[in-house]
Amino acid sequence: QVQLQESGPGLVKPSETLSLTCTVSGDSITNYHWSWIRQSPGKGLEWIGYIYYSGTTTYNPSLKSRVTISVDTPKNQFFLRLSSVTAADTAVYYCARDGSGGYGKFDYWGQGTLVTVSS
Amino acid sequence: DIQVTQSPSSVSASLGDRVTITCRASQNIGAWLAWYQQKPGKPPKLLIFAAFRLESGVPSRFSGSRSGTDFTLTISSLQPDDFATYYCQQANSFPWTFGQGTKVEVK
């Protein structure tokens, strides 16, 4: 059974960088595209971007200047870094598998991690 | 960005009711639309992809259809486990975007 688990700090100060890890078990990270998605009361569900194991990425243009998604294939993990955060970045952050080869079908999700931006 | 507009924002229904939720895309997205179910404190769960294809393990009371840029999720006979919030998501072009959600509540 495929499982994804997000981890990282739950509190980040404004202007600092949010860093999260998604650990994948039950499947090789080399088989699919892997996304980060966030959910906040104000903006609903927002796709942040995805990565393929080769390192190829695609980002949401609204966040592109601040986002980096990377992958560690031997550890079966991928990562999110979001710089210069503000209160608007407070959200539950999910990692998800795209089961359709990069065509936006999110068939497995992590449980989500709440990240609060506050001083 | 392609906007996907869901309606209604909430619906009150009883067990056994037929429930229909609509998602309208701001431009042609072909059949690149998925539907998810979300319960409080849980991640979204994929129900339907490519407009009408049922994800493995999802009950057959869920179905999807498309007419142009209008998409519909139908629950043929509402069950207790179906009270939740439903989202559509377009996967035709980047950035992939989600609808604002439809909450199915007890009448």
Image (tube, coloured by chain):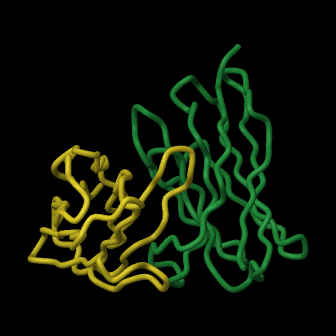
Q: Which of the 4 image quarters holds residue A79? A: bottom right
Give x and y (percent) for residue B46: 45, 70
Q: Colour of chain B?
A: yellow
Would you say B61 lies left or right of A115 here?
left
Residue A97 image position (x, y, % from top left): 60, 71
Horizontal arrangement in the rendering, residue A62 relative to residue A114 (left or right): left
Q: Could you tell me if residue B95 is visible in this image?
A: no
In the image, residue B25 sits, relative to residue A7, either above or below, namely: below
Q: Residue at x 73, y 34 (%)?
A: A17
Asked if residue A103 shows in the view, the reply is yes
Residue extending farthest right: A74
Task: Name, please, the residue furthest toward the top.
Answer: A119
Q: Residue at x 19, y 60 (%)?
A: B21
Q: Colour of chain A?
A: green
List x then y, in percent, for residue B76: 21, 73
**Does residue A8 sit above or below B86 in this rendering?**
above
Q: Which quarter of the figure is the C terminus of chain B placed in? A: top left
